[in-house]
Amino acid sequence: MLRVALFFSVAMVMLCGCKQEQQSATPPIPNEETTLNDVSYGNHPLEKMDVYLPKNRTANTRIIVFIHGGGWFSGDKADGRDGATYFQKQGYAFISINYRLTRTPENNIHPAQIEDIGKALDFIGQKNKEWTLTNNRIVLFGGSAGAHMAMLYAYKYDGAKKIKAVISIAGPTDLTDSAIRTNNLGDLTIEEVIESFIGAKITTDIKAWQEASPINYISSASPPTFFIHGTNDHTVPYQQSVSAYNKLKNAGGIAQLETLNGVDHDLIGINWLDVLPKIENFVIINTP
């Protein structure tokens, strides 16, 4: 769950061949391409976002909110920087957020991270007029642990139905599945990583693990979701996305599955020139 966002960042550099221009966090000039770094959406030092506003934006400009991976305990909003630049050039507002991490003395367990996503979305809504953006065409996009939170927020916590679509790259959907818990992430097992996120072992509080699993909240009302996953993923099994895809389809929802044959969790070998247009098309179709 650590490597997806990092490789996504590197891959975007190769695709767009562009560099981020640093901008101060001052009110953006209308319709000019602008990047605002380290914008605070809360009081915690990690409650910050980088905002990539496209040129010629309007009140209908689509917003992609990116949630980085890292096993809920590491990673940074900068992991999505070059992907952000790519989408910014395509006319999207791309907002990459940080959130409170686990495995710290503060013990920021679930749902602290979900609360941060909600707080970030509320802040974006408050800035719509200043940033010249819509509040009705929002997509959550995450990799690995970030994808898990994107799905969980959209399926379970988005009572206002702000989220119109979700993009999940190798996101875990069922935390109780033994096939994922026995895998490793560096020196930790995935089970240990999830324990840090939930704040309890599965043997002592399986209900909490179930309640933090996005697959348990899929229904016909769930937003359209694009699942992207490698068949050779040794961190988050490919079947995690397949099961969620099938459940959403069977519930009558909109789901798309992009199978990356032979690709592991690090996404080495993925053809971004093929996948990116599919992501854009999914966003366009499902945020009319």
Image: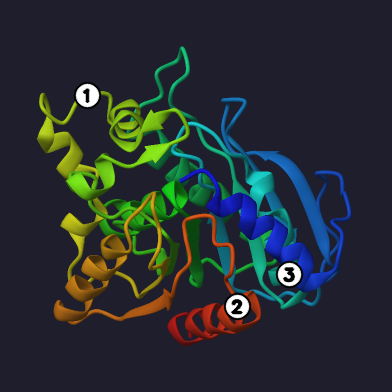
Which amino acid type is shown beneath numbered disc 1? Ala
Residue at screen point 17% across, 69% down:
219
Where, by quadrant of the figure, is residue 128 drawn?
bottom right
SS class, disc 1 = loop
Kindly report the distance in space between the C-alpha atoms of the residues bearing marks 2 and 1: 38 Å
Q: Which mark is residue 86?
A: 3
Q: Nearer the viewer, mark 3 or mark 2?
A: 2
Q: Which mark is residue 276?
A: 2
Where, by quadrant of the figure, is residue 13 drawn?
bottom right
Residue 210 shows up from this direction: yes
Name the outermost residue toward the top: 105
Which amino acid type is shown beneath numbered disc 2? Leu
Residue 127 shows up from this direction: no
SS class, disc 3 = helix
Residue occupied by mark 1: 200
SS class, disc 2 = helix
Which amino acid type is shown beneath numbered disc 3? Tyr
